[in-house]
Amino acid sequence: MSTFAAAPTALIVHAHPEPQSFSTAQMAATAQELRDAGYRVDVLDLYADAWAPVLGREEFAPVEGYFKPQAEQQRAVKDGTLDAVVKDHLDRLLAADLLVLSFPLWWFSLPAILKGWVDRVFVMGAVFGGDHGIREDGALAGKRAMLLLTTGGSGERFLPGGAFGAMDDFLFHIRRGMLEFVGYQVLDSVITYAPARMTEQERVAALEAVRESVALVAAEPQPAVR
């Protein structure tokens, strides 16, 4: 009797308000490339879903006195009282072998809606803390993550010594402080610089470059999950 390995799963969390944007086209190209490579692809489109980004006391059981969000997250995990939408997104996150955060670089960081997704879904007590540690002891250890982004400025401006400074400096807090913190192996970012300044032909070529980069990711062997 043959035994087949389950297809890997990718969760793409997309944060751009315009469906016709290059960022959205880039996300769709990435999703299709992963499907073509045998992945099951799950897409969360935060703007289309009207995701509420604020982590506040109203999503927890009544809290008397001092409100500490992470303590309430741990309590909700233990008591089984997590907000239903957060629980759904958390389950999809934990099920994914590959996490892709798709976004335009706004103010050299994540759009607020995506940062709020991290605030609410990287739940203390479920992805770190409680029975989990951080980094190699985080709940996502053995899984992979990557950033898929667009910029307004040209690539030259994001070089070391460029007008803005090195792109790695701007992405460090996301890669290290969010993704590696909960255990992910963080892959090289896929970045399209200044698509709004490109010709249509250049945008077509840029999307093909994205597909090629994603195909290389998909071809890598899946890491062993502990």
Image (tube, rainbow, N blue to C red):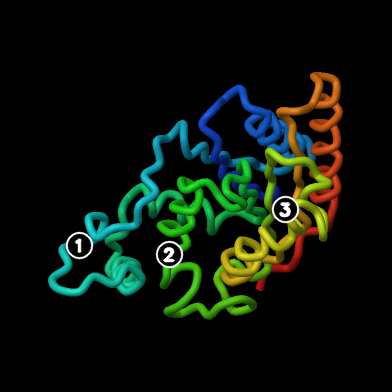
Foreground: 16 or 128?
16
Residue 29 relative to residue 50: left or right: right
Q: In this view of the protein, which residue sits in the foreground, 82 or 46?
A: 46
User: What residue is at 45 percent from the left and 50 percent from the top?
Assistant: 89
Name the secondary structure under disc 3. Answer: loop
Mark nearer the N terminus (2 vs 1): 1
Residue projecting furthest to the front: 163
Picture coordinates of residue 211 (x, y %)? 81, 37
Which kind of residue does numbered mark 2 sit on?
Val
Do residues under tags 2 and 3 come within 8 Å of each other at their CB atoms?
A: no
Residue at the image position 34 percent from the left and 57 percent from the top: 55
- Residue type marked 3: Phe
Tag shown at residue 123 = 2
Image coords of residue 171 (percent x, y): 67, 59
The tag on residue 61 is: 1
Which residue does the image show at 29% across and 72% down from the upper left? Answer: 68
Q: Nearer the viewer, mark 2 or mark 3?
A: 3
